[in-house]
Amino acid sequence: MAHDADIEAISFGTDGWRATLDEFTSDRVRMVGQAVATALEGDTVVVGYDARETSPGFAEDLAEVLAGNGFDVLLSDRDIPTPIVAWTVRERDLAGALMVTASHNPPEYNGVKFLPPGGAPATPEITAEVEAGLAPPEAVPEDEQGTIEEVDLVEPYFEHAVDAVDADLSGATVVYDAMHGSGRGVTDALLERAGADVERLRCEEDPTFGGESPEPAPERLETLAERVAGTDATLGVANDGDADRITVVTPDRGALDPNLFFAATYDALLGGEALADPDAYHRSGDVVRTVSTSSIVDRVAESHDQNVHETPVGFKWVADAMADHDALMGGEESGGFGLTSHLRNKDGVFVALAAAAVAAERSYDERVAALLDTHGGIHQDRVSVDCPDDRKEGVLADLEGALPDAMAGADVDRVSTVDGFKVFLDDGSWVLVRPSGTEPKLRVYAEAGSDERVQELLDAGRDLVAPLV
C-alpha cells in the first residue's frame, strides 16, 4: 500500500528525519505530525521552521495536523532558530514542539525535529515511540480541535537571555555571519541589544544559502575571518542553518577549534564570568562532553576540582548527562554547546551572547594562549575506514578481543567503552574507534601532543581496525 511505502521512507536519525525534497513530501510530513500527536500528552505545542523556501508550508502542515488532534498550536511568526523553539517548550512547560529544519544540510534537503517536554533532544526511546505511530492524519471531531496562533517567540527569549548573561558589550565589535540561516535578525539583534556594534555578513534572506550548505566550517568562514582580523573586532560569530551550533572566530586564530572554545568558555564560566547571577546559573561546576571531544576540557575541570562526564557522540546523550549530574555546561567537538541552567540543548544564539561577554572581559586569543601554556597543546584528527553498516557490530565485537597492550610505542593505560573503544595511553594520548551514525564507515580519532604523534596513532588505529572489516 502507498501508506506503507511512505512509512518506510521516513527514518529518524540522530536528530529527527531529514531527506531530499523528492522524499520529504507534504503527505509524509503530515504522517510525522500525526505520530507526534499520538505520542504527546498535554494541551499546547510549538511549531517552528527554518529559512528554507519550503519550510513555512511544511510547518503549516504540521500545525494543521496537531490542531486537528486537539492541540493548541503556537506557530512561529517567522523562520526561527531551533533553540528558541526548544527554550519556549521548557519555559512555558508545553507538551513539546516540532521544528521544520534540515540544519546544516544543503538547500535541496529539509527535515523535521521533534522536541519533547523540557526542550532537550528526544531520546531513542521517545523517537522509537514516534516512529511506531506513523500514520495518515486522523482528526478528532471539529468541536474538539485546537487552535493555531501565530506568535512572536523571539522577544521572550531575548528578555531571558539578557537577564541571564552579564553582557555589557558597549565598546565591543562583533562580526556576525548568519550564513543566510535562521540566526539572521536574531543572534545579531541579541548582541546589539546587549550593546555591541555588530557588522553583518550573509544576513540577507536567501533560502538557497548562497548555493551551499549553511555549515560553519573554517573553509566556509574565510570572509568572516578576514573581516575579524582586518577590523580588529572583539570576535566573530557564525551559526549554522538553524542556529543551534556556533563557530567563534578570533583575530589571531581565525575559526577557533571548537575544543579550545569549549575549554576557554568553560574556564571563564567557572570563574564566575559572563553569567549575571552565579548563584542562580552556576549551580554546579561539572562539565559534560562527548567521547570525541578533547581532553583539554578535562584538564580545565581538574584544575578547578570539577568532574567530567563522558557520553557517546550525539547531544541527546550530552543533555541526559547534563541533567543527571547538574552540570554547568555540556558540549561536543562539532560546535554544539549548552548551559544546563538555560536549556539542556545546544544553543548557538545564547552561547553567542555568553561568548561575547567572555571576550569583552578578555579576548579568546589571550584565554586560549593561557590555557595552552598551563595545560599543554592539543592536536587532534580523525580518519575513516569503510565498513558496511551490517558489519559494524561484528567489527566492534571482534575489536574487543583484539585490543593490544600497547599502541604506537605507548602502553595502554585504560579503555573506555562509552561509544566504541577509546584507548587511553600512558603518554597522555588517546585513540578512539567508533561507528559512524550516518555513513558506512568506522571513525578513528586520535589526540596527542603533536601532529606527528596524532598521525602515528591514526595509522596504528587504522591498522588495528581495517583487517577486521
Image: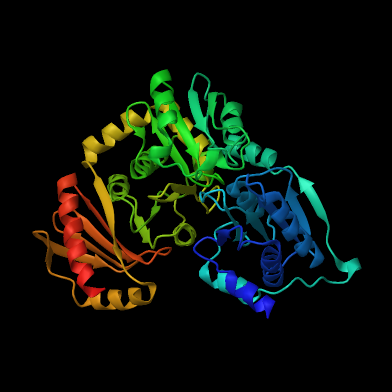
Foreground residue, 330 or 67? 67
Indicate the position of residue 320 as horizontal and vertical percent values.
48, 62
Question: Taking 302 as reference, is 15 above or below it?
Answer: below
Foreground residue, 137 or 42? 137
Residue 275 visible in rendering: no
Give the residue drawn at x 34%, y 51%: 306
Quadrant occupied by the C terminus:
bottom left
Indicate the position of residue 141 as horizontal and vertical percent values.
88, 71
Indicate the position of residue 428 as horizontal and vertical percent values.
18, 53
Which residue is situated farthest in the front direction here?
A: 22
Indicate the position of residue 269 as horizontal and vertical percent values.
42, 40
Foreground residue, 148 or 277? 148
Give the residue drawn at x 65%, y 37%: 159
Give the residue drawn at x 44%, y 39%: 247
Give the residue drawn at x 46%, y 35%: 355
Residue 436 visible in rendering: yes
Structure colour scheme: rainbow
Question: Taking 74 as reference, is 275 above or below it?
Answer: above
